[in-house]
Image (cartoon, rainbow, N blue to C red):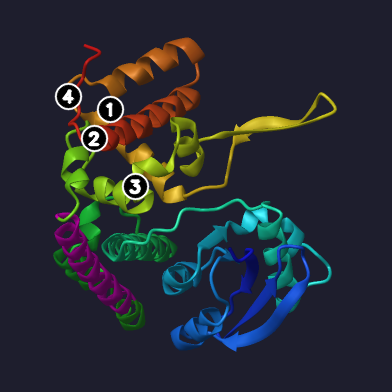
Amino acid sequence: MQQSIYVGLDLGSSRCHQTVINADGSLRMSRSIPTSEQHLRTAFSALGDNVRVHLESGELADWVHSVIKPMVAEVVVSHSRTLAWIGKDSQKDDAVDARKLAELLRLNRTHPVYCETADDRRLFKQLVTHHEDLSREQARLKSKIKARLRTLGIIRFDARLFSKSGNALLLDELEEPSIRQMLAQSFAVLNQLLDAETQAKQAMTAASKQFPEVSLLQSAPGVGIITACRFVAYIQTPHRFSNKRKLWRFCRLGITRRESNGKRLAHPRLDSAGVGSLKDVSRKVFEAARRTKKDNSFKRAFECALLNTKNAVHARLSTQRKILSTLRAMWLSMQPYQDIGR
């Protein structure tokens, strides 16, 4: 059987650098290739069997992973936070980075991240992130419009300001033509964003019908179609986490502790590594569950945690972790929500 050969692939938008080393660490090949599907296939088809590839996560990683995966024995994608030896080294270029990626894989010193291979789930995630981008853009523009109005002494808190009828009423109140024109342009952009967001939501909702877990998760208190879609799109599969604590860390709800020589270097805090959108999902589900008139386990969990900790923030974070654990358990078992704690 052919010995494993290890390939470090440093990705770039125009060119990639491929470094190949043998099992004993000796250099076999180092070259730059254009970033295209044809050139990637040609570069890896000549390497033979038992090829293991290591690359850094980024915008190109999922696409490159899908291109070369059928041609090699293994593709490992590592998070950039775990590659400080590469990112912070004073000697840094594409060839050096690719060699280090290959060496880390040969030494089995990698920290792989999950890469979805199913095209339908990757497309669904793109639809969800597109909807999120449009939501953030229209929220940012609304804040800018309100700030502009405050400079004119117009302070409005009602949401009707951003409806088309509300736009017209406000513009009629303005006497200065240049100010009216400026705000009319801002409202026109906002209305286009709101229409685009509505269409993006419809596309996301239509695509979610092929995933039964989306409708299943909506049986939990506070979970709507948008939060269910976001959770499914980012998690992709609940089997990627061996326990709930790894899920919490992925959702930026894990606790990081720094100690040395038995001494604390910093106070325990939330780990910033992970997906912020999932932390936001758990927060929105928590708030929606608390607003419901019916009693539910999330409400009771918050009240119990608040009684124990005497801290509303810590109680909320504990409840958010419970929400994520519940959604993961529902997905794993494909069973609807049951409030067994009553």
Q: Kindly identify the residue that appears in the image at 41 percent across and 60 percent down.
A: 150
The reply to whether the C-beta atoms of the residues labelled 4 and 1 are less than 8 Å apart is no
Provide the residue designation for mark 1.
290
- Which type of secondary structure does the marked residue at label 3 adopt? loop
For the C terminus, the quadrant is top left
- On whether residue 192 falls in the magenta region, the answer is yes
Given the image, on which type of amino acid does mark 4 rest? Lys
Q: What's the magenta bit mostly, secondary-structure-wise?
A: helix
Quadrant hosting residue 38: bottom left
Separation of marks 3 and 4 at Cα, in angstroms: 32 Å
Residue of label 4: 293
Determine whether 38 is above or below 135 in the image: below
| Residue 159, x across and y down, in percent | 24, 53
User: According to the image, label 2 marks what residue?
Assistant: 222
Q: Amino acid at mark 2?
A: Gly
Give the class, few, some or many, for how many residues have Cα within 10 Å of label 3's Cα (few <14, many ≥20).
some
Name the kind of residue labelled 1 in the image.
Answer: Arg
Q: Real-space Cα distance between discs 2 and 1? A: 8 Å
Foreground pick, 175 / 41: 41
Circle 1 or circle 3, nearest the eye: 3
Whether residue 71 is in magenta: the answer is no
Which segment did they paint magenta?
183-209
Secondary structure at badge 2 equals loop
